[in-house]
Image (cartoon, rainbow, N blue to C red):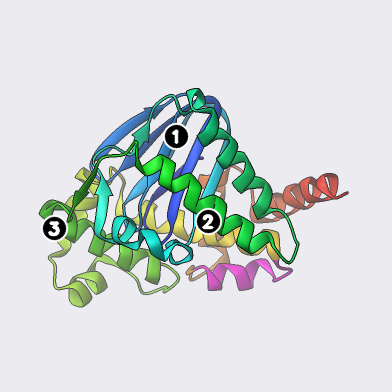
Amino acid sequence: MACESHLHYHLEFFYLLEGQSRVYVDSAVYDVFPGDLLLVFPNQIHRFECVSPERYLLFIINPDMMPELEGAFLHRTPTQAIIRNVKDDPYLLSLMHLLAESAMQASPYSAATMRGTMLAFFGRLLSRVELTRGISPNLHSVRTIVDYCTRNYASPTLSLKTMEEELHLSRYHISHIFSHKLNINFNRYINSLRISSACRLLRSTDRSITEIAGLSGFNTSRSFNRAFFDQMGLSPTQYRRAMASIDAVNQP
């Protein structure tokens, strides 16, 4: 589950089956244990840390699939992102497993089944969640910065200087936000976004390492290889081979 701070338009939640995770959502920190569910609304800043080896169910859902709940998802946020002891709610658990099953089905009715299950699931879940309106003023600039980075990380010219010019925020203020709000150095954060993109390309395409480096925002293959090894602990070529072996084993 480990990943750096990011935000997106989708709903994201995961149910922890085994292990332990630490999750940062906006300015809050949550330790997640087996049986807990962590819920992230659209455009909330979040990142994950693995505390011990995990097994979990992870869902990323477009809120447009549930227009009936748009007012909740797009105009409010949970006061607490963690819902404890979901394991003790058999109805909610059965809906969650049905949602996972319907997502993997390929029938003419799977989309309808999925939408109906999502409405039932979130109708039940939101009854256990306290919602608040609006966004904390202290988070506006943080979200602006993170959103800009997630949209522009592939640009090799991205820097504190370009962000200062584009966002009309002092580069020192931006650097302070990374250090004190996101707890990560600016360059390391951008590299983490670029490496995540490179991993997807390495696994899902046959593009060359040099081409993937450029598409992910690196000026040279050397800087790409160094950053990739620093984050992943192996080279891009080794990663591609390892993922190909895993995919081959998992194929029926």
Numbered mark located on residue 196 in the image: 2
Q: Which residue is mark 1?
A: 37
Residue 157: x %, y % from top left: 36, 74
Q: Are marks 3 and 1 in contact (CB under 8 Å)?
A: no
Q: Can you tell which of label 3 and label 1 is closer to the viewer?
A: 1
Residue sitting at x 73%, y 55%: 105
One can see residue 67 in this view = yes
- Number of numbered markers: 3
Which residue is tagged 3? Answer: 173
Q: Position of residue 208 (x, y in %)?
A: 69, 70
> N-terminal of the two: label 2 or label 1?
1
In this rendering, position of residue 131 left or right of residue 54: left
Most foreground residue, 152 or 224? 152
Is 50 on the left or on the right of 134, as rendered? right
Residue 168 image label = none
Q: Residue at x 45, y 29 (%)?
A: 36
Q: Amino acid at mark 2?
A: Ser
- Residue ID at (49%, 27%): 89
Q: Secondary structure at mark 2?
A: helix
Q: Horizontal and vertical percent for residue 109?
A: 70, 63
**Which residues make up the magenta segment?**
205-216
How far apart are labels 2 and 1 at the CA level? 24 Å
Q: Position of residue 131 (x, y in %)?
A: 24, 45
* Mark nearer the viewer, 2 or 1: 1
Q: Secondary structure at mark 1?
A: strand
Three-letter code, disc 3: His
Q: Could you give the CA–CA distance between mark 3 and mark 2, rounded to whole angstroms?
A: 26 Å
Label 1, residues with CA under 10 Å away: few <14, some 14-19, many ≥20? many
Report the residue that reaches farthest toward the right.
252
Q: CA distance from mark 3 to mark 1?
A: 34 Å
